[in-house]
Image (cartoon, coloured by chain):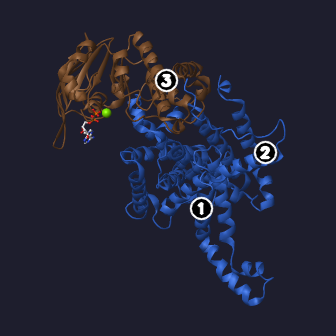
């Protein structure tokens, strides 16, 4: 029954996606990204961006405050570790619920407005959450230090089951498997695949069609008997749950939570990921998240020593000039590179990397395409001449 | 008996009295035309029926239920669909999707979180939408993006979007404006077929050919007031109408 509701193409896409994610450590090794810490980030931010895309890509509502849900998810997960159990399942479950609950509250208020006013409201709410985490909520968030595990935490479920971590600080473990390194990555990867599947179901469903209608023309929707508000709110809550889940997973792979996760730069990052990859497409957000985390990793690790080496083929004076220019774009200055990259994409590829891939495919198809296999651009314009 | 009854409706925009104590009875199963010069308040009147505007005073009753102070989607769910003077369609979606959405709205109500059953499985809704597109002569363009259509085609698409809902009352605001003669005649035929199914229609129209081919009753609106009302042959000869509407020219 459920299988019959998926087209063959979708099954193939899901299969290839799963294979690519699970083989990530091998596929990404040649570009130096085949190690677990980075792979975990790819998967987690992939989930974050997938959820963001359900809101922004489908309904067109641009939230600048989604990091608040990510942060709420992290805090919830760490608290679950402290109070209930080091098993990641309750932690991510509660983190997802908290993301959804928090999103329901904020969405209910912000969705009274649309366009730029909506964006500003979400930004304001996220900044409020960030400031509260630093001030009034310190008993819950542990302020600037961040929320951490302690040996003396109660962990009632673990205690009831007689699970004792001894004198060391416990780390999250999935029925005996430590959630750091590769097991941690595979845990996140399986969840990413499930999230991708769910996102695909939404895209292909009547519900998803309604979300695209929200983006296209809300007036027409209303006069067609559809209540736009609950559709937008449902999309907002679902994307909040994805964000909460991603925040929970951040805590699973590294059990601490800090308020900086809620900062506006983190909210902006998921916007960039989605647009960079291609908003409104299924795969784009995951690719965008991977690309940004990859480049962040490379560029922010560069320092002057590495740059000196890179330019040592130049005469010494030139070498120094090149190094001082390019050092602006690396290390702490990585955001400058990100900004430039983003501008290039928005100007030349407004549909994101996905549009780039599609153009490349059409171009290759046209070059090599002979007789039968030629990729005919499927956007054949249909001039409206026919007076029938 | 009347399906829609409008009593003493007034609407002002600042100092401008757009509707001045309008009374109107639309009998079930008829085609009722509203004619009148530009700026007479015809579109404003329809806006008061679908919840786009609230009248300052007066009442609008449809099928025993007030249409005032309720949301547009509730009015539609009650059985009122409207084609707008400037087409309101989903410009980013395909024609087929444009027609499937109202069909889903009719079947599933104002909000349904239908996530698991893919659109591909909804062959009934799809077939219904395709039939409707064929009815308005757009089936060859079913997979085109609606925003790229000509104005006349957009209008026909919007008509299909309303018709697929099988409304009790269909409101049409200048449905043939911007259409070529041949398309106008096709639209007249289509509207005759819809009328034959027993759908009640209110048509605002400037093209007298259209009005006299379809209307069973005509109301004439000028400066926000109904100045004449009656059967087509009576309206044709009414000197007040000729005066107000055509400045004395012959109908
Ligand atoms: N939303 C509005 N705000 C202000 N004035 C309006 C508005 N809608 C219509 N009007 C004015 O009300 C009068 C009637 O307009 P309308 O109902 O569109 O006329 P018709 O459809 O008969 O050509 C016009 O003078 C128009 O300018
Ligand atoms: Mg008008």
Q: Position of residue A135 (x, y in %)?
A: 39, 64
| Residue that numbered label 3 is attached to | B182
Which sits in the foreground, B218 or A257? B218
Which quadrant of the figure contains the C terminus of chain A?
top right
- Direction from residue A50 to residue A62 in the image, left or right: left
Q: Residue furthest bottom?
A: A317
Q: Position of residue A32 (x, y in %)?
A: 77, 62
Element under disc 2: helix
| Residue that numbered label 2 is attached to | A365
Which marked residue is nearer to the observer: mark 2 or mark 1? Answer: 2
Colour of chain B, in one word, is: brown
Which sits in the foreground, A369 or B102? A369
Which one is earlier in the sequence, the residue at label 2 or at label 1? 1
| Residue that numbered label 1 is attached to | A342
- Direction from residue B157 to residue A300 in the image, left or right: right
Q: Position of residue B227 (x, y in %)?
A: 17, 24
Q: Residues within 10 Å of mark 1 (few under 14, many from 20)?
A: some
The residues bearing labels 3 and 1 have C-alpha atoms spaced at a distance of 50 Å
Are the residues under badges 2 and 1 in a single subunit? yes
């Amino acid at each position: 029954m459920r299988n019959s509701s998926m087209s063959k193409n979708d099954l193939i896409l899901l299969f290839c996606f799963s294979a690519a994610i699970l083989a990530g450590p091998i596929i990404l090794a040649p570009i130096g990204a085949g190690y677990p810490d980075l792979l975990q980030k790819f998967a987690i931010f992939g989930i974050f961006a997938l959820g963001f895309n359900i809101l922004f890509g489908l309904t067109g509502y641009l939230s600048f405050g989604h990091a608040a849900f990510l942060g709420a998810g992290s805090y919830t997960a760490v608290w679950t570790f402290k109070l209930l159990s080091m098993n990641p399942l309750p932690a991510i479950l509660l983190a997802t619920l908290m993301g959804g609950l928090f999103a329901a509250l904020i969405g209910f208020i912000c969705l009274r407005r649309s366009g730029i006013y909506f964006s500003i409201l979400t930004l304001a709410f996220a900044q409020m959450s960030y400031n509260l985490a630093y001030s009034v909520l310190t008993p819950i968030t542990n302020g600037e230090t961040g929320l951490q595990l302690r040996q003396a935490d109660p962990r009632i479920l673990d205690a009831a089951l007689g699970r004792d971590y001894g004198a060391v600080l416990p780390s999250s473990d999935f029925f005996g498997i430590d959630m750091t390194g590769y097991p941690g990555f595979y845990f996140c990867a399986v969840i990413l695949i499930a999230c991708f599947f769910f996102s695909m179901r939404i895209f292909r469903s009547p519900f998803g069609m309604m979300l695209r209608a929200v983006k296209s023309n809300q007036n027409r929707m209303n006069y067609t008997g559809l209540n736009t508000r609950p559709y937008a709110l449902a999309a907002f809550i679902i994307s909040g749950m994805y964000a909460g889940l991603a925040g929970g997973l951040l805590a699973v792979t590294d059990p601490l939570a800090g308020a900086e996760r809620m900062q506006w730069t983190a909210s902006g990052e998921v916007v960039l990921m989605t647009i960079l990859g291609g908003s409104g497409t299924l795969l784009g957000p995951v690719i965008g998240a991977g690309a940004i985390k990859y480049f962040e990793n490379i560029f922010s690790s560069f320092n002057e020593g590495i740059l000196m080496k890179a330019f040592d083929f130049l005469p010494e004076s030139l070498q120094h000039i090149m190094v001082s220019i390019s050092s602006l774009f690396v290390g702490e200055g990585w955001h400058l590179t990100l900004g430039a990259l983003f501008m290039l994409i928005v100007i030349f590829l407004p549909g994101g990397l996905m549009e780039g891939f599609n153009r490349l495919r059409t171009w290759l198809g046209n070059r090599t395409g002979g007789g039968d296999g030629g990729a005919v651009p499927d956007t054949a314009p249909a001039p409206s001449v026919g007076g029938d | 008996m009347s399906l829609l009854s409008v009593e003493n409706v007034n609407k002002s925009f600042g100092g401008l009295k757009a509707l001045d104590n309008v009374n109107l009875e639309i009998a079930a199963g008829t085609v009722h035309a509203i004619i009148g010069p530009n700026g007479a308040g015809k579109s404003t009147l329809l806006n008061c029926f679908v919840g786009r505007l609230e009248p300052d005073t007066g009442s609008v009753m449809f099928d025993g239920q007030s249409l005032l102070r309720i949301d547009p989607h509730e009015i539609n769910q009650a059985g009122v669909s409207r084609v707008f003077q400037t087409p309101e369609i989903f410009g980013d979606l395909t024609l087929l999707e444009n027609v499937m959405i109202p069909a889903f709205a009719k079947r599933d109500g104002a909000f349904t979180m239908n996530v698991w059953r893919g659109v591909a499985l909804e062959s009934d809704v799809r077939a219904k939408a395709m039939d409707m597109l064929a009815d308005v002569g757009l089936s060859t363009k079913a997979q085109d993006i609606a925003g790229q259509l000509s104005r006349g085609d957009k209008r026909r698409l919007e008509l299909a979007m309303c018709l697929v809902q099988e409304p009790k009352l269909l409101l049409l605001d200048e449905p043939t404006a911007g259409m070529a003669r041949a398309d106008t005649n096709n639209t007249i035929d289509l509207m005759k077929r819809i009328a034959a199914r027993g759908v009640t229609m209110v048509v605002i129209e400037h093209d007298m050919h259209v009005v006299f081919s379809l209307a069973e009753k005509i109301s004439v609106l000028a400066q926000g007031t109904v100045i004449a009302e009656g059967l087509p042959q009576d309206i044709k000869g009414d000197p007040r109408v000729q005066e107000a509407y055509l400045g004395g020219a012959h109908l």
